[in-house]
Image (cartoon, coloured by chain):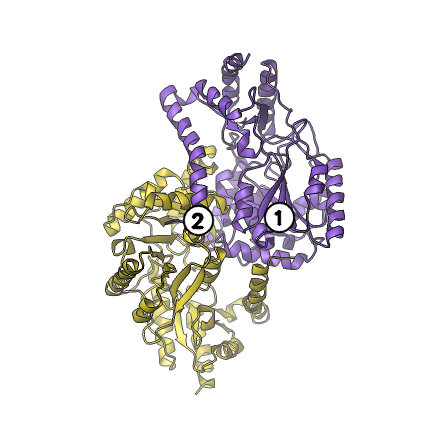
Chain colours: A yellow, B purple
Amino acid sequence: MISKKMEKMVTNNSAIRAMFEEGNRLAKIYGKENVFDFSLGNPNVPAPAAVKAAIEEILEEDSLMVHGYNNSNAGYEDVRQVIAGSLNRRFQTAFSEKNIIMTVGAAGGLNVILKALLNPGDEVLTFAPYFVEYRSYVANYDGVLLEVSPNTVDFQPKLDEFEAKITPKTRAVIVNTPNNPTGVVYSEETIKKMAAIMESKQKEFGTEIILISDEPYRELAYDGVEVPYLTKYYNNTVVGYSYSKSLSLPGERIGYLVIPDEMTDSENVIQAAVIANRILGFVNAPTLQQRVVAKCIDEKTDISYYDKNRETLYNGLKELGFECTKPQGAFYLFVKSPVADEKEFVTTAKKYNLLLVPGSSFACPGYVRIAYCVSHETIVNSLPKFAELAKEYK
Amino acid sequence: MISKKMEKMVTNNSAIRAMFEEGNRLAKIYGKENVFDFSLGNPNVPAPAAVKAAIEEILEEDSLMVHGYNNSNAGYEDVRQVIAGSLNRRFQTAFSEKNIIMTVGAAGGLNVILKALLNPGDEVLTFAPYFVEYRSYVANYDGVLLEVSPNTVDFQPKLDEFEAKITPKTRAVIVNTPNNPTGVVYSEETIKKMAAIMESKQKEFGTEIILISDEPYRELAYDGVEVPYLTKYYNNTVVGYSYSKSLSLPGERIGYLVIPDEMTDSENVIQAAVIANRILGFVNAPTLQQRVVAKCIDEKTDISYYDKNRETLYNGLKELGFECTKPQGAFYLFVKSPVADEKEFVTTAKKYNLLLVPGSSFACPGYVRIAYCVSHETIVNSLPKFAELAKEYK
């Protein structure tokens, strides 16, 4: 009954679905507080109080304006101006509202730009481990996702392999820094090297290779680390942003794309993206939330909350003998499984009500992802369980 | 730089864009109140007061729940229960929450179900005149949209031609009643005949043909006319609904799909649709608005407002000698152009600051669409302009 493409996805989906249901099952037996669900990237920090205040303020305005269609499918012009201005102040860029397209989250934005750019058979490169949905997003437009293998020493990108894997069919490269699932941030030096490789390959092949920067975790960086703004290093860059983590609004689906003037054929790409946004059925980003993010442009989520979790969990696990690169951003730890088959480790962990995600789901077997965007109490109470788990592998 | 598929769309888009800019240009010269913009289906009735009250009430709850990810990409279970219950009460159906998938508007919903169902080359039938975006939605999944020619006598579907055009490759049929752009409502008799044709063709070809009912205008029906609920007449029916018009929330992108148990392989279709919703980048429908529509389930937009516009405009235009089928639903009049080339008529109308949409945009040349979801004042003040326009063609 369903399409051939979807048949495969429904089959694959069952595993993830089964794990999710397992979590619910365990919670029913042991009580929610005794199940340590580290599987989802759902922020546990409430939205800033300013979000509520902004909504209340907006509701006093004319309902036809608040909830109506936008004049442009790219979103409210004044909202896009506010965002461009904020980026310009923070990153010394020179965007105007026309470079910003409001999207239904970063996931919506990635789909929009991939639809605007990809012809069937085009190759898209990304670095393992990576957010598994990239594969589906690229497949939606009949592109082929190819991966650079993981560098398990420090999870920085393997640039030699990257260079070797760029072909005349390479249309785009997706990077995600701060990274899901490793928490690693790419340094300015890395970005410069990456940009130089892409520039040189563009010349060699006479092609345009677009760098797509998926940035839902931009604001979640610790220890004062800088997250370089990629449009400044490489002209053919598109940024996909989301307020899901920075304002704790993941369910509201609000984000934007940045398509800079420096990009080749920029005007056309912008127009194609606006049309893709419309015909994929997004039409426009949700209007009330567009206004909210403009009003909350200088608001920040309380990252000290995640930072505290990061320190407690990282130190706790290291003490127990687990191997892990200390993350500089996002809210994930990517921990080496004590046995090669990390799915077995995940199954064992479940005995202690610890719900982890196998690295295979991120094209990096032998590791597990722990999402620490949970309450600090959950972190603290989980450590004795991790201790019991560690014992099994000694 | 952009994909081949999008190149064509960017070229075609320029015409619509030009018209939109023309409206803005005229408004600047003559003042907004002297430009009669009948081009957009943007409701002019404010959202019911209950919407504001609902949002304020929801904001008092835990922000993590209000703005967080849903447990299921299908949307909040309790919201889906409320919607299923409301449909069951109104239409004597037997839906539960699992039959409802919350979507980013009806446009999002149509994309989701088409992605779930279509293989490349599959045929989708619809009845001219039709909402032009169907062509893009079907093309997104490499389907082929085929049209049944318009019945310009009363704009009811031509069922003989419909029957003749169903082939073994026909995968879906899209209907839209109340209809954009004609305002026509399909009678129960029509629906029964249509269902019988599809049942018989399914048997003849050994195929499954899915009826997709696009229903953003369901609640906008006048003169007490009944809009039949299609799942009751044909098992393989999927309904796409939107609150854009019924609660005047077009910018908020909130709607749902109904996939009934009676449908062949229903469980699989539901699962495929939920996954399609996720991988197309919608992820989940906006959370705050999900809660709003549940709280406002019994609220209705003030259709007497549109009804008044309908009467004034329809009677006014008839008196001036224009030909038009009186619409029973939606908020559009589909008026016969006094000259065969309706684009010429649209251009002439522009001289009087009357902005109309050519029927060619709905696969029905020789007609123009007038969206009367504007203020009553605009309707009244436009009539002398229509009178001047009519004179040109006498």
Residue at the spot x=51%, y=38% of the render?
A: B250
Amino acid type, label 1: Glu
Residue at the spot x=60%, y=48% of the render?
A: B257
Q: Camera-side residue: A335 or B139?
A: B139
Mark 2 Cα-neighbour bin, 10 Å: few <14, some 14–19, many ≥20: few
**Residue carrying label 2:** B4
Q: Is residue A252 left or right of residue B189?
A: left
Whether marks 1 and 2 lie on the same chain: yes
Name the subunit of mark 2.
B
Amino acid type, label 2: Lys
| Number of numbered tags placed on the structure image | 2
Q: Camera-side residue: B69 or A30?
A: B69
Q: Camera-side residue: A323 or B338?
A: B338
Q: Secondary structure at mark 1?
A: strand
Q: x%, y% of residue A77?
A: 36, 38
Mark 1 Cα-neighbour bin, 10 Å: few <14, some 14–19, many ≥20: many
Q: x%, y% of residue A237?
A: 32, 54
Q: x%, y% of residue B63?
A: 46, 52
Q: Is residue B288 visible?
A: yes
Q: Is residue A339 left or right of residue B303?
A: left
Q: x%, y% of residue A49?
A: 39, 49
Residues tagged 1 and 2 counted as in contact (Cβ below 8 A): no
Q: Give how far apart the Cα atoms at labels 1 and 2 are.
A: 21 Å
Q: Give the quarter of the image for residue A71.
A: top left
Image position of A219 with respect to B220: above or below: below
Which mark is drawn over residue B123?
A: 1
Q: Secondary structure at mark 2?
A: helix
